[in-house]
Amino acid sequence: MNVAGSLVRRGLDAHAEHGDKINIPTWGAVMLISTTIVYLVAMFTIEYTFGRLIPTLVMIESPQDSISFEPLATEDPDSTINKDPEQPAKPQLITSSFRRTLRHLGGFSARFRGFGIFVVNALAVQWIAGILSVLPIINLLPRGFSNAVALVACAQLSLTWTHIVISQPSPKTWFRRLAPVKMWKKVAIPTAVFALAEQLAVYVPIYMSILAGLVDKDAKQIVDLTPNQKTAMTFKAIGILLFGLVLAFLIVIPANVTLTRVQASLLDDAEETIVPFDRSFGGKVIPEIVGGSGMIGMLDAWKTFDWASRIRLIKTYLKVVGMQMAVTFLFTMCLVSQLFIIAGNDWSKLVPEDGKDGNKN
């Protein structure tokens, strides 16, 4: 340990002595770092609240008329009076808009409900995947296998996160609301399907890029390409990107919806959901007390998610992408403006120079 520490210190000292330096004033560095931190926080908020929490509610919300009971008519339908009564307006879904959903959730902290167990789950998945990745046998399996296994191993945490997100606020901590261990086997297969779909959507485009020769060229090789070769490379990249998006829509979203609805079907009867939710899934769920499984099957979980809800979910994801693009553009313009303020008329401040002799590179 002492030898390693000595080598690390020597490396840092050498970098400080001979490494490239950029002459940015302290106030400028603070401004740039602060802007970057604000950007990262904004992007995480969009990703968590609008990209995870709200879509989860979209996946389980049911129209009010599908879970309510209509009272028996008290008037003679053949009566000549009120022959054409005015039909009541159909109630609007809570997740029909971001504003309506956020207003329904409540205060600002409600936008981060389930955040504690979300972090624990993410760390646990990374930890297990890291341990598996050093095993020799894992190197013989396709890339992403360790991540998929880690997701399945942590299925109990993911199940608890879904239950916390879709249920009414509770004074209990996430640890006290942890799903029973026996429920792991009920969500293991849907979790494995989702994990496999997610890894396919990531690694298939990567392998396609390798086969297309898009990742084995450095900057100099790209510059030396002919115009026709550059055009061909551009079209290949766009085609693979579009294929990856289509793959995500065709396998990842259905797998995610299926998993979420299976998880929601396991919510304890004592827990009230924060949005209208048909626990019977149109009569598909048979309670355990009468000999059923007490949960929705994977195929029924997807079939009972009607086309109106699917379109609403896709619109939600498109809105999230639009928000991320808008925020990225805004902060890029902000950073460029700050660089102009820092540099002023002397852009040489932003040009790296040799730390030893002060010469510009």
Image (cartoon, helix red, strand yellow):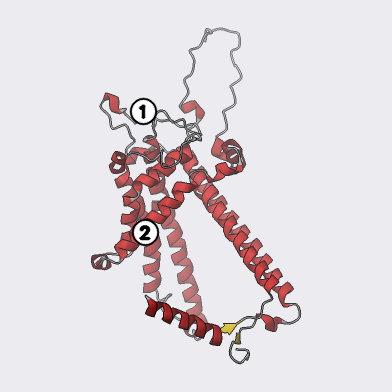
Q: Is residue 346 left or right of residue 239?
A: right
Q: Residue furthest right?
A: 345
Answer few, some or many: residues within 10 Å of disc 1's Cα (few below 14, many 20 plus, some between 14 and 19): few
- Observer able to see residue 180: yes
Q: Which residue is mark 2?
A: 127
Q: Nearer the viewer, residue 310 or 144?
A: 144
- Of labels 2 and 1, the one closer to you: 2
Q: Which residue is mark 1?
A: 283
Q: Quadrant of residue 348?
A: bottom right
- Sequence order check: which comes first, mark 2 or mark 1? 2
Q: Is 162 placed left or right of 344 in the picture?
A: left
Q: What residue occupies the far front of the structure in this picture?
A: 2
- The amino acid type found where label 2 is placed reads Trp
Q: CA distance from mark 2 to mark 1?
A: 40 Å
Residue 354 point in image, percent of width and height:
59, 88
Q: Position of residue 183 (x, y in %)?
A: 31, 39
Looking at the image, residue 82 lies above or below residue 156: above
Q: Position of residue 291 (x, y in %)?
A: 25, 27
